[in-house]
Amino acid sequence: MFQPIREVLDRRDLLYMLTWREIRVKYKQTVMGTLWAVLMPLVIVCAGLVVRVAFAKASETPLAWSDLTSVTVKAAPWAFFVSALRFGTNSLVANTDLITKVYLPRVIFPLAAVFSQLLDFLIAGVLVGLFLVVVRAGFSVYLFWLPVLLATLIALAVAFAIVLSAASLFFRDVKYIVEVFLTFAIFFTPVFYDTSLFGRWAPLLLINPISPLLEGLSTVVILHRSPSILWVSYSFVVTALLITVAVTTFRKVEPFFAESV
Amino acid sequence: MTSATMAVNVLDVEGVFKKFRRGELHNALRDLIPAVTQRLMNREQPERLEPREFWALQDVSFSVRRGEAFGIIGANGAGKSTILKLLTGIMRPTKGSIRAGGRISALIEVSAGFHQDLTGRENIYLNGTILGMTREEIRRRFDAIVDFSGLEEFIDTPVKRYSSGMFARLGFSVAAHVDPDLLLVDEVLSVGDYLFQRKCIERMNSVIASGATVVFVSHNLRAVSNLCPRSLLLEKGRVQMVGPTDDVIRTYFRRGQQQRVVDADSGVLLTHVITHDDSGPRVEFDSGGKLRITVEARARTPHHEVSVVIQIVDDHQYPVFETCTQRLGADAITLDRDQKVECTFELDLNLGEGTFHINALLHRYVTNRAYDRWLAAATFFVTGAPGERGIATLHPRLAACTVAAALDGAVGARS
């Protein structure tokens, strides 16, 4: 477990350059350039708002400001998670020429893929922040939960990306499974709704390790309360376990990459 | 192996086996289940070959000392590239061990990881970190890299607009500026024009001079014998020989003579090409001596108006000499079904020291159409006369060499 971490730290400049490459190449030869990095998260947040408003209208329930702000707070991290997984899954397949020609710690590829999505996430975060200031969401000491929740979310994305990237190198089916899964995941992840909507069935939705993190974010930022310690620690433990499993299995199959592409 | 030799050797390869599989891997889910169950039922044995599997390398052992330049020679498909991939760590051996000390750098696939949309400058940083440099190191060497590539004007142009030669030059320039303890080189010298190749050879020489270890894989035997005192001959995945490069190259050619791929359809074909002197077959000759070449051909169907052509080429395929039975005054040869013809050419060996190859051809007398051709059918080696250099021997004699006072002109004034 510690050996791969040291390997990656030794090659941190490579990790930096690969992350930089993904970001740099993403908006090359586009007319709008980096403006896309602002526009994309904006569209996602707006879509979330529209869906939430439509929800309320259709079910004829009163719509509070906090419902809308809650959607914006959850949509941005969810968008990050989805794109990190999508990108991470393809990260090894997209770099087969490097895998077969040069030796480097290959775990860097899924890492760089996830990290390259952080810029968009950061921009989205600033936009959401501005929005929250405008609607006077307020500040509280509970905002100190933010870094913990976000770090866990990123770590969870990294764990998935590592496993899925290796799996899809061996079996290209994985890419399609991930696509299908991510399309439907929005239904069993509380992004456009709150789990409280489901009453006593709520824990069922919280088994999804992302849910407590998203709920936690909205609780902390909007409601200015402490998140459910139980469920957040659950996410935390699941993430730690997944990362350990991901890194060890990745190490085990890594020697076969070059001849399996 | 004692600890003393371990310290001296930068690279120790011991009993390395590598197996590959022909055809498709199971890349879809429906193939996975039988494969996994089979693996669970009988645990995979490294020594046994499953159907479709084959050995790319078998029992390969060698070691390279610190500061040594070591060559690997072999025909296509002998396993040279597989060895390099195992040495870099891209692949892992099926069996056996590889121990390499220090930073390994490979001039194998230069410009790997270049991104088409990025500029030359950006790619230098990207490729440099891929090859193991830090950004700080690259910053320090940046000017030297650009200078070496000769691409100053285009350094801020996306590399997709580069020609393939420029692309490769930039790649080599980055790779050449990594300071390795062990440098692996695979056939990169074919990149670029003559001047650039010279630069590369110089660069490799300076790497060797700086005390780094070099493992060099190439088809360019002249380059191998110039750079590497010691080499390994690889044949069908097995080590055939390790020793002084010149001996290894000779063995390589001698073994190459024994095999010939024959097109079964040809009606007439060359069956033997042998070099010999009065006492019998041999491949080593002294400069200025006599060389006999015997060529044998057999006909399966009747052929008339055949002539036998021999060409002698040097190590770079440059033609040195050519003659044929027709030009030497023989009549056109007529062969009936299942007849054979044997011609012996006798030549004065006015060649200097070096390695030479014989191409044999069967021509149709009138039209010069080739019935059969056998390139590098035989190879022979010439040992030069003492005091001579060059590809030919012109039988020199010293006609005069006298010393006298130079009173008839001012020193340094040339007219």
Image (cartoon, rainbow, N blue to C red):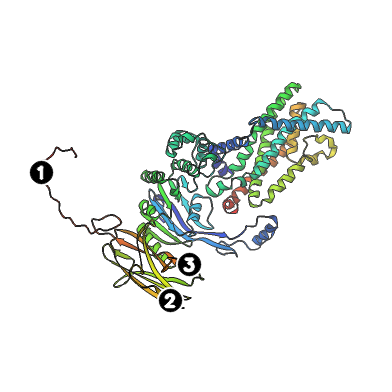
Per the model, the C-alpha gap separating discs 1 and 2 is 70 Å
Q: Considering only order in the chain, which callout, 2 or 1, is on the residue closer to the N terminus?
A: 2
Q: Considering only order in the chain, which callout, 3 or 1, is on the residue closer to the N terminus?
A: 3
Per the model, the C-alpha gap separating discs 1 and 3 is 67 Å
Query: Same chain for the residues at labels 3 and 2, yes or no?
Result: yes
Picture residue at 65% right of the left edge, 55% below the top: B27
In the figure, B320 relative to B404: above or below? below
Indicate the secondary structure of the residue bearing disc 1. Answer: loop
Q: Which quadrant would residue B334 be assigned to in this image?
A: bottom left
Crowding at dot 1, Cα within 10 Å, few <14 / some 14-19 / many 20+, comes out as: few
The chain containing the residue under callout 2 comes to: B
Identify the amino acid type marked 2: Leu
The chain containing the residue under callout 1 comes to: B
Indicate the secondary structure of the residue bearing disc 2. Answer: strand
Task: Report which residue position mark 2 lands on.
Answer: B335
Picture residue at 77% right of the left edge, 29% below the top: A70
The chain containing the residue under callout 3 comes to: B
Task: Report which residue position mark 3 lands on.
Answer: B261
Identify the amino acid type marked 3: Val
Crowding at dot 2, Cα within 10 Å, few <14 / some 14-19 / many 20+, comes out as: many
Task: Report which residue position mark 1 lands on.
Answer: B405
Name the image quarter holding the C terminus of chain B: top left
